[in-house]
Amino acid sequence: MKTLEDQMSFYAAYHQDPRNKATHFFGVPAIAVSLMIPLGWLRLDAGGFSVTGALVVTSVLLAYYLLLDVPLGLAMCVLFGLALWATDPIAQAPLATGLAWFGALFIGGWIVQLWGHVYEGRKPALVDNLFQVFVAPIFLAAEVFFALGYKPRLHEAVQKRALEMRAAALNSGARSAA
């Protein structure tokens, strides 16, 4: 398993422009929340408690985040817990309501993120590594931690490696064009 620094450095190499980062603070949560809606349609009631696809998938993702970093993983537990709480009534609403919310959040989230990559001048990280869709949420949580002064060594290491990766990609692209 790659470390948090490994995962975040790769993601950060594609997200250096502040405008791109800003669009991701809307787009990533919108997409994550949107996916909880159809996953919430998969529901098993057991002894008065509903186990949904959203709960199962989110629990697995949160376990991964906790393995990567406990403080960031705990922050993600709070955020994803709130998202699950907010999306469950939508998942239980009439199908047309759920589809409307899903479509608006999913499509809107991707439009905003892709718009951010226009500023970045670089394709999204998931084009080169699809697993990055799972890194995006914890990356944003880490960005908040960094802005508040937490985890400065991780921030410095991620930025250093991200800039090295970005420079290497630009150099290999320049060699390919020659």
Image (cartoon, rainbow, N blue to C red):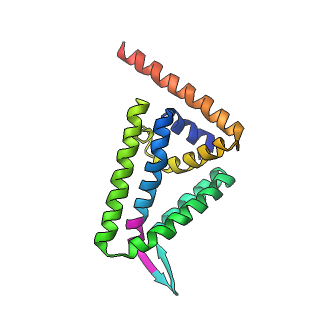
Query: Where does residue 89 sit, x and y in percent of width and height?
Result: 43, 74
Residue drawn at (65%, 37%), measured in percent from left and top? 155
Task: Determine which quarter of the picture holds residue 106.
Answer: bottom left
- Magenta stretch containing residue 90, yes or no? no
* Quarter of the rendering occupied by the C terminus: top left
Residue drawn at (42%, 37%), measured in percent from left and top? 128
Query: Where does residue 133 sit, x and y in percent of width and height?
Result: 46, 48
Query: Where does residue 153 sit, x and y in percent of width and height?
Result: 71, 37
Residue drawn at (70%, 42%), measured in percent from left and top? 149
Residue drawn at (49%, 32%), measured in percent from left and top? 17
Q: Residue furthest bottom?
A: 47
* Of residues 132 and 110, the one drawn nearer to the viewer in this rendering: 110
Report the magenta residues as a range: 37-44
Please determine whether, in this image, residue 20 is positioned above or below residue 75: above
- Magenta stretch containing residue 39, yes or no? yes
Task: Determine which quarter of the picture holds residue 92.
Answer: bottom left
* Of residues 86 and 123, the one drawn nearer to the viewer in this rendering: 86
